[in-house]
Every structure is written in structure tokens, then in C-alpha cells.
Amino acid sequence: MLLVDMRFRYYKYSLMLLCFSVALNTWAQEGAPANEPWAGFGVIVNPFVGKVYKHEEKFHLPIPELSYGTDVDFVIHTYGKKPWHQLRKFPTIGVGVTYTNYGIDSVYGQCIGLYPNIILPLVRGEKLEWTLRLGDGVGYVTKHFRRSAPVDTINAAIGSHINDFAYFSTDLSYHINQHWDVQLGAHFTHISDASHDKPNLGVNLYGGHVGLSYFPVTSKPKAIRQKLTPLRNRILVQGRLSMAVVSANSPGGPHYPVYLASGYASRRWKSKNKMFLGLDYSYHSDVSAFLKSIEVYPGKEAQHSWKSAVFFGNEFLFGRLGIVMQVGVYIKQAELIQDPYYEKIGGHYYLLQKEHGPLKEFFISAFLKTHKTVAELGEFGFGFGF
């Protein structure tokens, strides 16, 4: 079990390194001759208030009257140095830092989130702009469930200090001038350790914010526009192999590996998306261990510890990074029945992208699998396309 735990932590920190490498790689754009150094770089500051809500029946924690905090995002506007900038209407790349006080410090503690993100323009005018921000990273929570000192047996939402931190927001911004913006928006955050340590109900928070953005040089670097050759809407046969680590249902229990494999067909469209359809398989050694402990299927535990599903979804391509949204419907469930469908959100980072040759894609991947708002596991692996 120590080896499994070390392996999980290796994957977790590898994912963090991957996220920040992608962000920094995108930031490191060579300046176009028409733009001054640091053109497009800025800082967005959003104080916020919010509300924790009960997202499942097992969530028996006291609900705080009000939560509050501050989000600071260090951003840079893309301006067309890479083809995907223009395809995505010149989005903004950022690395955000969020402080959250959930309102009952003795139970929930406080959270510091650090997350790469992308801000996509939905409607862009001369003075007004409507955007969508998507981010995911790591969150450090000061309090979690524990029976040893300092005792906190009320907090059944969080099982460890280190958690996944997801951030989604939409904003309406008013451009005062090339240096200052003011914005008003709504956001949603989620923290969870993907069942690595139980209990792990997670904490969901929705809220609103108002803030300012400051760009020392300019918020509108001069865009590079070029004639782009559309990519062929090719179909690939793809595979993905990954692994997760989950804990037993009892707090402080052992950790078990989960092995996952996916096979699917993808079709690229509009040079910036890939729709896909395929089959998922997963083997859950935690379910097998549980069945052995209650001696329900002696010698046949493995037959009742795997799942299969048909899934579909879309991958949004941003150069070497793909943001994946996937929905699956179970064909077979393990002995411990869950919802008939599930969701996965995550990403691929492409180490190989080729238009020709037998092996056209090779990537590393990270996904959070959920049933509605309840996280089941976090998986890490690699994949390929022919």
C-alpha cells in the first residue's frame, strides 16, 4: 500500500507540474514587432462572497451563513503567435491564486487554490466583453477529517490537506481604457481529493464577485492575423490507459488501485475540436477487497469488480493542450451500484501531433470522474491515436 500511495502522489505532483508547464509554455510567446514587451499582461483581482451548498444526501455538515475570499489571476492575452490563438478568438491565459474562508473555520478550515486557467471570449465589443473562465489546479485546505489531534470528525467533506481545486466563472467586463477594466461575475469552485482519502464528499461553493483588472502596458496587444489552412476532418482510432488510487470507505483505511482502459474513435472538426465515441473499462480492486471481506462471492470477486460503459464527448483543442468533456452510460456495473451514468472532465497534453504516419498522436492525460457532483476518482495515464 505504501508503494501505491507513493505512486499516486507521484502522479498528483506530475499533474501539477504538467498544468503549470502548459501555462508557462503558453505565456512564453515571442513578442511580435508591433507589440511592446509585456503587452497583454495583467492582473485581475476579484473579492467574492459565496455560499456552500448541500450537493448530496450524505452532506450533513453545518452550512455556513456566508463564505468569502479573494481571487487573483495573473493573465496574458494571446494575440496570434500560434494558430490556435486565432482559431479560439484570442483567449486569455492565466495562473490564478484563490483564498477562500468557508465561514466556519473550526469545521471547514480555509483553502488556498493555485490553478492554471483559460478565459474564453463569448461576446466581445469595443467597451463590453462577456467571458467564460475555466481552471483546474491544486488546493491546500487547512482542516480535514481526522480522529487524532487536532480532531475534526465533523468535516466529512474533506479527507486530506491536498485536493483538486476547480474554478469556473463567467464575467461581464467594462474596458475603462487600455490599462483598467472593471468586472462583475458569478463563479463556482469545487475541492475534492478524488476519493484518495475518505471521507471525501467535497465542498462546492457558488458565489458572485466584483473586481478590477490592471494591465501595465495595454490590455489589447495588436493581433497577428494570418490565413490559416483548415485541417482535414480526419478520423482516428484511439486508446487511453490510466490508473487511479482510491481509499477504503472507512476513514484512514488502506488504498487500492483502479485500472482503466478506453478505446474510441474520434473525428476532428473546425480544426479545433474532436468529437469522439467509444468504450470504457475499469477494474476496481477496492470493490474486490470489500467482497472478499464479506465472503459473498468466494473466488469470484474479480467478476463483480469491473465496470464497462459506452461514452461520448468532445475535446476542445488549444495547441498541444486538449480540454475533454465526456459522458458515459454503464453497460455493466460492479457489485456496488452507482448512478447509471457518469461524467469525466480533464485533459490531454500532446507530446506528439502529426498529420501523417502510422502513429499520429501520443499524449499524457488526467481526468476527474464524477457521478453528478460527487467525485469517484482521479485518473492519470497516457494515450495514442492511429
Image: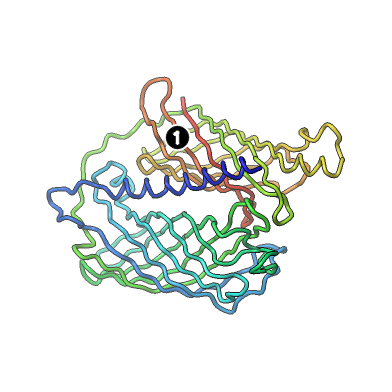
Q: Is residue 244 above or below residue 160?
A: above
Name the quadrant containing residue 37: bottom left
Q: How many marks?
A: 1
Which residue lies most toward the bottom here? 65
Name the residue nearer the viewer: 168 or 5.
5
Residue at horizontal 49 percent and vertical 70 percent from the top: 100
Which residue lies most toward the top here? 358
Residue 201 percent across, percent down from the top left: 65, 60
Q: Is residue 181 left or right of residue 224?
A: right
Q: In this view, does 157 lie to the left or right of 250?
A: left
Name the residue nearer the viewer: 246 or 231.
246
Residue 200 percent across, percent down from the top left: 65, 58
Indicate the amino acid at tag 1: Phe
Residue at horizontal 55 percent and vertical 44 percent from the top: 326
Colour scheme in use: rainbow
Crowdedness of circle 1 by 10 Å Cα count: few (<14), some, many (20+)? many
Which residue lies most toward the left here? 33
Task: Name the residue beneath numbered marker 1.
Answer: 363
Residue at horizontal 78 percent and vertical 37 percent from the top: 304
Residue 146 percent across, percent down from the top left: 67, 63
Residue 335 percent across, percent down from the top left: 78, 42
